[in-house]
Image (cartoon, helix red, strand yellow):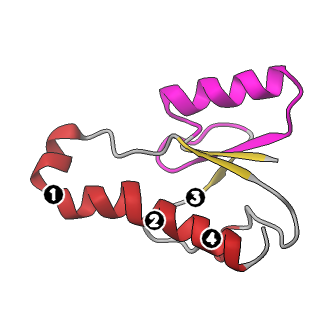
């Protein structure tokens, strides 16, 4: 199973569509822009174990297309941009390793 974080944005939407057209088991998430067939995930405030995205013992490939697209805001608030785009992705990966996912 492939999980695309940020599958309602331009890049994530196209990645998800390509996998699904090729019959590859995949699912996507959204944060602000709800799209049919995608699951809500707030990378900044949700823990992976609370999201329902992962099942213990299953294997996943995670593609992060979830980014804070507010470039000017990211320049002004570097700590938040780093937190969302680096720390939280690392937390998800650590969760998967710790739970044999």
Residue occupying image coordinates x 27% and y 55% = 81
Circle 2: is it few (<14), some (14-19), or many (20+) Cα within 10 Å?
some
- Label whose residue precedes the other's in the sequence (4 or 1): 4
The span from disc 4 to disc 1 (Cα, nearest Å) is 24 Å
Q: Which residue is mark 4?
A: 48
Where disc 4 sits, the SS reads helix
Residue 51 x/y as whole percent: 66, 68
Callout 3 touching callout 2 (CB < 8 Å): no
Determine the secondary structure under disc 1: loop
Which stretch appears magenta? 7-36
Q: Which of pointers 3 and 2 lies earlier in the amino acid sequence?
A: 3
Query: Would residue 56 appear left or right of 63 to someone viewing this image?
Result: right
Q: CA distance from mark 2 to mark 4?
A: 10 Å
Q: Tell me the residue that label 1 is attached to.
A: 77
Discs 4/3, front: 4
Q: For marks 2 and 1, give the one nearer the viewer.
A: 2
Residue 33 vs 18, above or below: the answer is below
Residue pictured at 51% horizontal, 50% vertical: 31
Which one is in front, 72 or 90? 90
Element marked by disc 3: loop
Instruction: Give the Cα separation between the discs numbered 3 and 2.
Output: 12 Å
Image: 100 above or below 54: below
Give the residue pinned by disc 2: 88
Q: In what element is the residue under mark 2?
A: helix
């Amino acid at each position: 199973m492939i999980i695309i974080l940020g599958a309602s944005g331009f890049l994530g939407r196209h990645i998800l569509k390509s996998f699904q057209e090729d019959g590859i088991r995949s699912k996507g998430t959204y944060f602000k822009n709800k799209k049919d067939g995608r699951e809500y995930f707030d990378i900044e405030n949700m823990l992976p174990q609370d999201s329902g995205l992962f099942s213990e013992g299953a294997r996943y490939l995670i593609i992060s297309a979830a980014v804070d697209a507010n470039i000017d805001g990211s320049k002004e608030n570097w700590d938040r941009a780093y937190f969302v785009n680096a720390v939280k992705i690392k937390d998800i990966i650590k969760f998967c390793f710790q739970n044999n996912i």
